[in-house]
Amino acid sequence: MLLRQIEIGGVEMQKIFVAVSGGCASVLEDTVPQGFAVEVIDFDNIGAGDPFPSDEAREFCTARGLYEPHRAALR
């Protein structure tokens, strides 16, 4: 695994890289630490009717005001 490590304010951190090209995002798997899962949330696709990658992703976005479900979907 190739972990990218940086230091910010004296704290060593790791980076996870996500590449986006032409509106398509992909996670560079070799930068994700073991035991972590990365989900890409594409609001354009969700707005077009695709589902969230998981219930957790939907709840995260809704709780933080990043996504407001259409009223029709709540019926």
Image: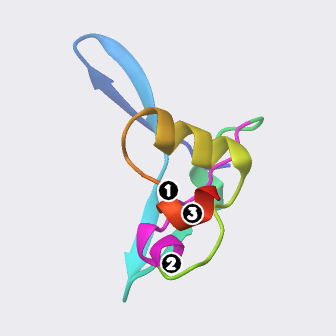
Q: For the residue marked with disc 3, what is the amino acid?
A: Leu
Provide the residue designation for mark 3: 28
Q: Is residue 49 above or below residue 31?
A: below
Q: Is residue 22 above or below residue 31?
A: below
Q: Indicate which disc, 1 or 2, sits on the residue closer to the N terminus.
A: 2
> Residue placed at 27% from the left, 10% from the top?
10
Residue 45's disc is 2
Q: Which residues are magenta?
A: 36-47
Kindly identify the residue that appears in the image at 55 percent across and 43 percent down: 3
Q: CA distance from mark 1 to mark 3?
A: 30 Å
Q: Are marks 1 and 3 in contact (CB under 8 Å)?
A: no
Which residue has dot 1 on it? 69
Nearest-to-viewer mark from 1 and 2: 1
Q: What residue type is disc 1 on?
A: Pro
In this view of the protein, which residue sits in the foreground, 38 or 31? 38
Crowding near pointer 3: few (<14 within 10 Å), some, many (20+)?
few
Circle 1 residues within 10 Å: few <14, some 14–19, many ≥20: few
Q: Position of residue 14 (x, y in %)?
A: 47, 33
Q: Relative to 39, is 14 on the left or the right? A: left
